[in-house]
Image (cartoon, rainbow, N blue to C red):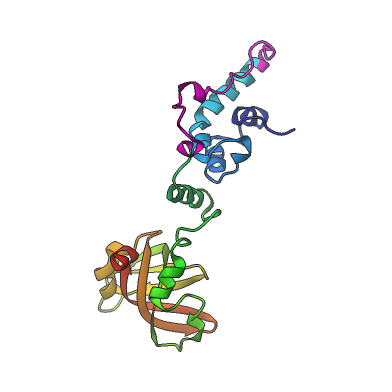
Amino acid sequence: GAYESIENLCERIDAQLLNKTALEALAKTGALESLGMARREAYESVDRALRASASAREDKRRGQGLLFGAPPPAADSASADPDDTKESLEWSEADRLAKEKEALGFYLSGHPFEKRGKFYARLAGHTSATLGDVPSGESVRIAGMVSSVRVLTIKQGRNAGLKMAKFLLEDLDGMVPITCFARTYGEVKDDIVEDSIVFVEGRLEREGEETAMLLDSLRTAQSIVN
């Protein structure tokens, strides 16, 4: 049958399978919302639910299950401010999306770039989808969210020992691989931050069907819009 509560879920599934890490991941991704709990509320209930289910299992093992079942969930309504709403039990949108990506490796219910992405695309002039019409070697500007940042140490040549970076720039249409060589990296490294919204300008490189960009400059969206 349907699970009645987070405690009921923990009690009915083998603790070896549904440990704290797995249960927190379910809460972060919204999988426990069907139990009538907001994500933050479910996440903060994990320890209590695991303790209650462990106690219930021990009682059953001792043959006392009928007398000493799992304690009911704490009645939040008794101590909560009557003016509180369910939103007070939920993370902000930014935190919710961050938790999703932390648990899954990708965004599920939305994207940080979604709200202002079209506006930023108009300011930039291009999106990842329109780069296919731009000749290789031409400079373009696009806006997006930084992801999959890798900072590398150059091992050979005149820049040996210096740092460079590679990352993906995600927008509403797709993503573009970005390479940032040592000189530019020294100028913009503080703004190459995972999940930050930025405008990048650089030279296109095309190999087969894949389009990439060599970075010339990078500015945060906040610095441009403000």
Task: Work out which residue is located at the far front of the displayed protein and give it.
Answer: 83
**Residue 161, image x and y in percent?**
26, 69
Q: Who is closer to the viewer here, 77 or 91?
A: 77
Q: Judge whether residue 79 is colored magenta.
A: yes
Residue 14 falls in which quadrant of the image? top right
Q: Quadrant of the N terminus?
A: top right
Q: Which span of residues is magenta-colored?
A: 60-89
Find residue 159 and report its image quarter. bottom left
Q: Position of residue 119 (x, y in %)?
A: 42, 69
Which quadrant: the C terminus? bottom left
By secondary structure, the bulk of the magenta-drawn segment is best described as loop
Rendered location of residue 107, percent (x, y): 52, 55
Residue located 54% across and 43% down the image? 25
Query: Residue 158, can we see it?
Result: yes
> Can residue 155 be seen in the rendering of this structure?
no
User: Is residue 198 within the magenta segment?
Assistant: no
